[in-house]
Amino acid sequence: MSRFAEVIVLALDACEVMEPLTRDDESRSWRGRFVPIDSQWPQTRRYHLPAPPTDEFPPSPGVLVRTDNIGHDQLQQTPEAGRDQRRAW
């Protein structure tokens, strides 16, 4: 059975992170590999929440919001200085 999925990688150095998955690998429990494709994701914007008060909370990579939806322009982007500076992955 064939399955197709569109995967969004929200990671620092995403191309480097995904590179091993673009090659076939017989040691995996699944067959296949990821290939880059053109996507509809240009209509999105990443919003960052304010940093948590302490490090006991996990870091947040932010959220993707579609820019073609009504109300997206009402979201307030957290200034870079107020974002969580820890790596989420």
Image: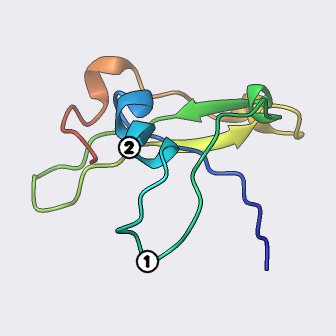
Look at the picture and state if 18 lies above or below 53. above
x, y percent for residue 8: 59, 45
Tell me if 44 is positioned left or right of 24 in this view.
right
In depth, the one of 36 and 49 nearer the eye is 36
Report if residue 63 is visible in the image: yes
Residue at the image position 82 percent from the left and 39 percent from the top: 71
- Residue 49 visible in the shown view: no
Q: Which residue is mark 2?
A: 20
Measuring 25% from the left and 50% from the top, which residue is drawn there? 59
Q: Residue at x 47, y 41 (%)?
A: 10
Q: Residue furthest top?
A: 80
Residue contact at pointers 2 and 1, CB within 8 angstroms: no
Q: Amino acid at mark 1?
A: Ser
Query: How many numbered circles does the render carry?
Result: 2
* Label 2 packing within 10 angstroms: few (<14), some (14-19), many (20+): few
84 displayed left or right of 25: left
Q: Amino acid at mark 2?
A: Pro
Percent coordinates x, y for residue 53 in the rendering: 17, 49
Disc 2 element: helix
Q: Residues within 10 Å of mark 1 (few under 14, many from 20)?
A: few
In this view, the residue farthest toward the front is 26
Q: Vertically, is 15 above or below 28?
A: above
- Vertical relation: 24 (above or below) 14: below
Residue at (38, 43) in percent of width and height: 20
Between discs 2 and 1, the one toward the N terminus: 2
Badge 1 marks a residue whose secondary structure is loop
Q: Residue 26, image x and y in percent?
A: 41, 65
- Name the mark on residue 65: none
Q: Quadrant of residue 12?
A: top left
Mark 1 highlights which residue?
29
Query: Residue 1 falls in which quadrant of the image?
Result: bottom right
Query: Separation of disc 2 and disc 1 at Cα?
Result: 15 Å
